[in-house]
Amino acid sequence: MNRLYNALQLKRLYQLKQLGIRYVPLVEKRNAPATTLPNDLEALERIVAECRLCALCKTRTKTVFGEGDPNASLMFVGEGPGAQEDMTGRPFVGRAGELLTKMIENAIEIPRSSVYIANIVKCRPPNNRVPTPEEAYTCLPFLMKQIEIVSPKVVVALGATAYHYLTGDKSGITKVRGEVVDMGAYKLIPTYHPSYLLRNPSAKKEVYQDLLKIKRLLCEN
Ligand code: URA
């Protein structure tokens, strides 16, 4: 809850910065409500579809909210939509998505439809560049709300961007992959992004170990 509140405050600061305001006195509101975002995925998706809070709205075709089982115990978080996701409005439907589906169905041995899949940013960054901190922090409250609503047991951070914005830790993905991070309400496991695996197939064996670990975590009470 606190992390969501902090992310919302950061989002407001980045919005002000984008409007040209360089200094904002911090007003402490200890009893402020944790969020003004709805506790309902469909209502949240409608807000995201209309979002104009950062410059990515100007170049997107469709917002990519996320999809899957709203009661999933396993959630995957990527970086941001690519070209095919931008066209279809669905996460991980391109080549990286095909590989992610295989990872879920062949290694964890559950259907893709039984997990929830989302991204750090909901709009495609031009030329698939890494989202800027402004874009990521502006969008992050939507993802935090999705995590709060779905309430998964395990969240898999796909790649360094997802790991960094979900945990605040700037460590490289090679160093942290496969570690289990206790996030309080859920366990987080970072692993390599499927796009990285397409370029570096030899890293698939490490990801396979991470996926087996995820499978074991899901079976624990
Ligand atoms: N890469 C991502 O990080 N997310 C997608 O939805 C697709 C590719």
Image: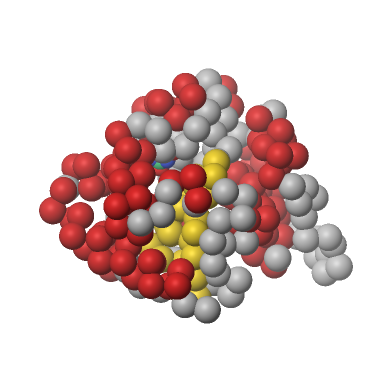
Q: Is residue 209 above or below residue 77?
A: below
Where residue 129 appears, as percent x and y from the top left, is 38, 35
Q: Nearer the viewer, residue 205 or 139?
A: 205
Q: Nearer the viewer, residue 50 or 131?
A: 50
Left or right: where 193 falls relative to 28: left
Q: Which residue lies at the image location 55% right of the left edge and 41% below the top edge?
A: 66
Where residue 43 appears, as percent x and y from the top left, is 75, 39
Q: Residue furthest bottom?
A: 221
Q: Residue furthest left?
A: 202
Left or right: where 34 falls relative to 181: right
Q: Is residue 189 above or below residue 9?
A: below
Where residue 166 appears, as percent x and y from the top left, is 51, 59
Where residue 85 appears, as percent x and y from the top left, is 45, 30
Task: Residue 79: tell me if it is visible.
Answer: yes
Q: Split into 4 quadrants, where in the image is the N terminus?
A: bottom right
Q: Residue furthest right?
A: 31
Q: Which residue lies at the image location 31% right of the left edge and 67% below the top edge?
A: 212
Left or right: where 6 falls relative to 131: right
Task: Residue 37: tell me if it is visible.
Answer: no
Q: Which residue lies at the image location 54% right of the left edge and 61% below the top edge?
A: 73
